[in-house]
Image (spheres, grey):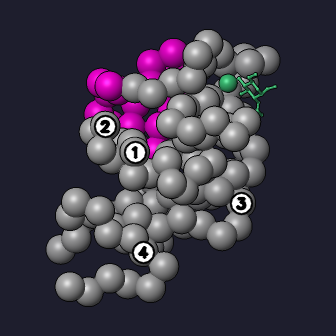
Amino acid sequence: EYIKQGWFYFSNHLYYKSETKKSWQESRQDCLQRGADLTIISSREEQVFVRNFLSAWIGLTDNETEGIWKWVDGTPLNTSYWHDKEPNNANSNENCGEIGYHGKLNTWNDKPCHSENYWICEKMVM
Ligand code: 2F8
Ligand code: CA
């Protein structure tokens, strides 16, 4: 089966890990230009797969309403993998989600959307 260069296959989806760092919004733009979006983590298995690429922006934000976290496709957060004491909205300025921080596996953190991070795009296999 065909896999585009730089993309990793998992369970009917392709994942792309960036090699540079950008803000959350610019990262999302990059994904959209690739016919994808920031990754949405919707199962334990996917969480375990995606954590291979950390740390990186994922498609999670509470930009619309503080404290109400949503995926970029508009779906609310069901199962979450926040690190202990996260999301903490440090300095009232953390509205974007990343997977992995401080070298910790398998956890999410909220951080300032304008800060630069690697990012993970996801798209369905046609
Ligand atoms: O200790 C958790 C805390 O660590 C950092 O702030 C000191 C993170 N900030 C950035 O990554 C910019 C916080 O998001 C995190 O909650
Ligand atoms: Ca935080």
User: Would residue 95 be seen by someone viewing this image from the given angle?
Assistant: no
Tags 1 and 4 touching, CB below 8 Å: no
Q: Is residue 76 magenta?
A: yes
Q: Nearer the viewer, residue 70 or 99?
A: 99
Magenta-tinted stretch: 59-79
Residue at the spot of label 3:
21
Between 123 and 101, which is closer to the camera in this rendering?
101
Q: Give the number of the disc on residue 44.
A: 2
Q: Which residue in the protein does label 4 denote?
A: 7
30 on left or right of 126: right
The secondary structure that dominates the magenta segment is loop
Residue nearest the viewer, comparing 60 with 82: 82
The reply to whether discs 2 and 3 touch (Cβ–Cβ < 8 Å) is no
Q: Secondary structure at mark 1?
A: helix
For badge 2, the amino acid type reads: Arg
How far apart in space, not on screen, are marks 1 and 4 (Cα)? 17 Å
Please tell me which of labels 2 and 3 falls first in the chain: 3
